[in-house]
Image: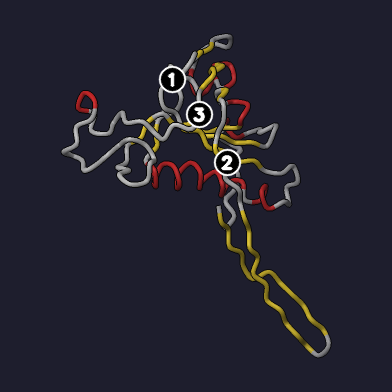
């Protein structure tokens, strides 16, 4: 099924450059064998730094945060425009960012399934499968790129659609209809 774009949520109401990104700073799921963060099991007996029990474990680090302009996302930080958080060097610690792009054409598969991709990236792949939580301070966890912190890089997910067709032959006439689709990320 095609998921509706959450345009009623301010983080997604106008993606001017058709790019969405999510960033996480904490890992809360045991990841013993997949290199997706440093929360190691088994818990509840595992005691991390200061007894955190994976509460403050780090995600797999794939980026450096340059800065966060709080004026880009005032609903995420409740701070007046003109304030910034600047992260020189690797001061921000381990951070993981992941996003996707979609076409201007509303009929393009990437645009039709943009909300499906948003759900996959934010909720399924990163929250459920990897256990990533907590946003970069002063920024939304996910949003249109123009609202997110400036980072050195981010991973990207592509949406691949496979259409299934039903062909009917009546006499010398052949007709085809889309009977379903498979969406892969």
User: Which of 150 and 112 lies nearest the eye of the viewer?
Assistant: 150
Q: Residue at 23%, 30% (x, y): give it.
A: 48
In percent of width and height, residue 73 lies at 56, 22
The residue located at (57%, 45%) in the rendering is 157
> Alpha-carbon neighbours of circle 2 within 10 Å: few (<14), some, or many (≥20)?
few
Give me the disc on residue 127. Answer: none
Q: Determine whether, in the image, residue 115 is placed left or right of residue 102.
A: left
Would you name the residue on which mark 1 appears?
Answer: 92
- The residues tagged by marks 2 and 1 sit, at their Cα atoms, a distance apart of 21 Å
Residue at image position (56%, 47%) is 117
Q: Please, is residue 89 above or below residue 44 in the view?
A: above
In the picture as drawn, the residue positioned furthest to the left comes out as 45
Left or right of 36: which side holds 68?
Answer: right
State the SS at label 2: strand
Q: Which mark is residue 63?
A: 3
Instruction: Kindly state the secondary structure of the residue where label 1 is placed.
Output: loop
Q: Which residue is mark 2?
A: 156
Quarter placement of the N terminus: bottom right
* Image vertical order of residue 120 relative to residue 91, above or below: below
Figure quadrant of residue 184: bottom right
Describe the element under mark 3 as helix, strand or loop.
loop
Tell me if residue 172 comes above or below residue 150 in the rendering.
below
């Amino acid at each position: 099924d095609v998921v509706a774009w959450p345009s009623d949520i301010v983080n997604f109401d106008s993606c001017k450059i058709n790019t969405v990104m999510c960033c996480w700073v904490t890992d809360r799921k045991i990841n013993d064998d997949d290199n997706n963060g440093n929360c190691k099991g088994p818990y509840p007996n595992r005691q991390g730094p200061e007894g955190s029990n994976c509460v403050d474990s780090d995600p797999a680090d794939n980026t450096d945060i340059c800065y966060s302009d709080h004026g880009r996302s005032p609903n995420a930080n409740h701070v007046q425009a003109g304030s910034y958080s600047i992260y020189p060097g690797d001061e921000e610690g381990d951070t993981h960012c992941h996003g996707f792009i979609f076409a201007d054409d509303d009929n393009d598969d990437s645009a039709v399934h943009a909300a499906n991709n948003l759900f996959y990236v934010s909720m399924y792949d990163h929250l459920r499968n990897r256990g990533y939580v907590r946003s970069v301070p002063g920024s939304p966890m996910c949003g249109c790129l123009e609202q997110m912190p400036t980072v050195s890089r981010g991973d990207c997910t592509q949406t691949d659609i496979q259409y299934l067709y039903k062909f009917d032959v009546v006499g010398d006439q052949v007709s085809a209809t889309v009977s379903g689709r498979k969406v892969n990320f």
